[in-house]
Image: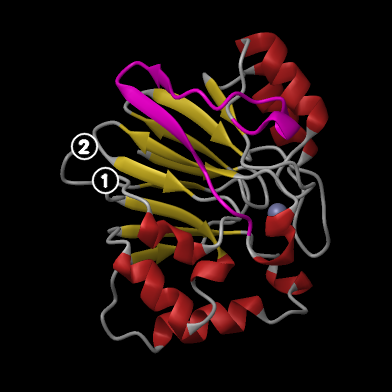
Amino acid sequence: MEIRRTANAGILLKLDGVTILMDGVCREVKPYPATPPETKAQLTAQMPEVVAFTHSHKDHYDPGFAAAALQKNGVIIGPSECHGTMEPLTVGSVRITPVPSRHIGAAGKDTQHVSFVMEGSSCVWFTGDASPTQFRNLSLPKPDVLIVPYAYCNTAAAWEFTQQLGASYVVLLHMPAPTDDYQGLWDAVHSVIKSDISGQPTVYIPDVNKTLTIQLPRD
Ligand SMILES: [Zn+2]
């Protein structure tokens, strides 16, 4: 599969030939990066087959792009605040299931939020800003690849929980550019990863517009 980071906390996933954009065009919320204008233009011109948003916060969602996606594809997956539908969708051999979830922290109370589970030859979870601990109570298929924000990896306790989800790979999003990192997130994440001697799962932290290719045994 291919995973291209196109936004602060968003990706273009290519799984079994199906293109799925999740939180893939966003606006800037300092210190987190906006989708570069040329990337947004390219995605608008070549609309992915599936467009999904986890929630309507600026650093995850762009209403102008959502309107274009809705016009082109007829449907967006996500909460109604993002003009989305909560119906699961099958495209080719990939099934995309929205899973209602709670946003991390105080915002959880008043923000509609969903996570996404993609099932094809591999299983991918895209959590959005969902708080990590709720997943232990849900019976979801085990992820091969987990796509999550820094909060899943910036403390030893969060990382231990993330490991228990059983993925082979973690793709960490919602990271600021190192030059804008006044919260010290890069240091926090690196120290957690370095102090974990298991080395499992493998962690990737892609730059915006970088594409990862992940080869799983079942691909
Ligand atoms: Zn949010």
Locate the C terminus by quadrant: top left
- Is disc 1 placed on a helix, strand or loop? loop
Q: Amino acid at mark 1?
A: Gln
What residue does disc 1 label? 215
The residue most toward the left is 217
Q: CA distance from mark 2 to mark 1?
A: 7 Å
Quadrant in which ligand 1 is drawn: bottom right
Q: Residue at x 61, y 12 (%)?
A: 73
Instruction: Report the front residue among 93 and 1.
Output: 93
Locate the N terminus by quadrant: top left
| Left or right, 191 with reference to 29 | left
What residue does disc 2 label? 219
- Is disc 2 placed on a helix, strand or loop? loop
Crowdedness of circle 1 by 10 Å Cα count: few (<14), some, many (20+)? few
Crowdedness of circle 2 by 10 Å Cα count: few (<14), some, many (20+)? few
Instruction: Report the front residue among 52 and 175.
Output: 52
Q: Amino acid at mark 2?
A: Asp
Instruction: Indicate the position of residue 52 as horizontal and vertical percent values.
Output: 59, 31
Instruction: Indicate the position of residue 56 as horizontal and vertical percent values.
Output: 74, 41
Q: Splitting the image into 4 quarters, where does residue 95 fall?
A: top left
Instruction: Report the front residue among 206 and 19.
Output: 19
Q: Residue at x 78, y 35 (%)?
A: 62
Magenta highlight on residue 158: no
Q: Splitting the image into 4 quarters, where does residue 55 fall?
A: top right
Q: Is disc 2 in contact with disc 1, using a CB cutoff of under 8 Å?
A: yes
In this rendering, the answer to whether 214 lies above or below 46 is below
Magenta residues, as a range?
Answer: 78-103
Q: Splitting the image into 4 quarters, where does residue 186 fall?
A: bottom right
Magenta highlight on residue 83: yes
| Left or right, 78 with reference to 88 | right
In this rendering, the answer to whether 74 lies above or below 52 is above
Instruction: Indicate the position of residue 85 as horizontal and vertical percent values.
Output: 60, 23
